[in-house]
């Protein structure tokens, strides 16, 4: 278990060499557990948003994708009647002003969110989020 005071330090590790600008840890319900900064400012400086509202919005989108994956998992024929879970481990969203990557935490109902510049390498972003 990670102590809440250490969350920003751990998140700052994946944002250390400026590939990921901001890292956020939220629950599946969108509650902010920690972030590397209090507000997010877009690379061009035109948008300023609180981490709480941004984390909630991104978590809601990621959870919708997970639920959709669970619905589609039931369409696959299986020999066991056990409930199927979504296999979504990482979600990459590409926007005009940047990349948003979301990774599920194994065994815990939490999501790690990384926000990067639009030209950041997707593989590097995914690898850093999966490492946490």
Image: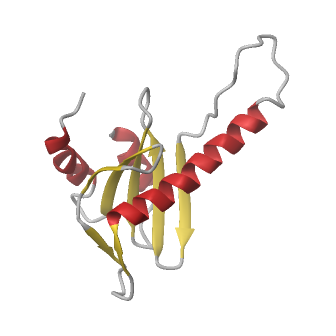
Q: Residue at x 79, y 29 (%)?
A: 74
- Rendered-image quadrant of the C terminus: top left
Q: Residue at x 49, y 59 (%)?
A: 58
In the displayed structure, 132 sits above or below 59; it is above
In the displayed structure, 9 sits above or below 92; it is above
Is residue 20 visible in the rendered structure shown here? no
- Counting from the top left corner in percent of width and height, residue 87 is at 61, 34
Which of 88 and 123 lies nearest the eye of the viewer?
Answer: 88
- Counting from the top left corner in percent of width and height, residue 55 is at 41, 58
In this rendering, position of residue 85 left or right of residue 113: right
Residue lying at the far top of the rendered structure: 80
Q: Quadrant of residue 20?
A: bottom left
- Counting from the top left corner in percent of width and height, residue 99 is at 47, 66
- Counting from the top left corner in percent of width and height, residue 112 is at 39, 47
Instruction: Give the number of callouts.
Output: 0
Q: Residue at x 35, y 61 (%)?
A: 52
- Rendered-image quadrant of the N terminus: top left
Q: Quadrant of residue 41?
A: bottom left
Q: Residue at x 77, y 11 (%)?
A: 80
Is residue 110 visible in the rendered structure shown here? yes
In the displayed structure, 102 sits above or below 104; it is below
The colour scheme is secondary structure
């Amino acid at each position: 278990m990670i102590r809440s005071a250490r969350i920003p330090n751990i998140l700052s590790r994946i944002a250390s060499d400026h590939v990921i600008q901001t890292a956020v840890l939220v629950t599946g319900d969108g509650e902010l557990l920690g972030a590397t900064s209090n507000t997010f400012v877009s690379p061009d400086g035109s948008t300023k948003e609180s981490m709480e509202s941004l984390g909630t919005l991104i978590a809601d989108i990621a959870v919708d994708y997970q639920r959709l994956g669970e619905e589609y998992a039931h369409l696959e024929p299986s020999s066991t009647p056990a409930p199927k879970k979504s296999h979504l481990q990482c979600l990459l969203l590409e926007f005009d002003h940047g990349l948003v990557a979301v990774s599920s935490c194994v065994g815990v109902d939490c999501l790690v969110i990384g926000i990067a510049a639009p030209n950041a390498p997707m593989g590097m972003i995914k690898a850093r989020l999966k490492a946490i």
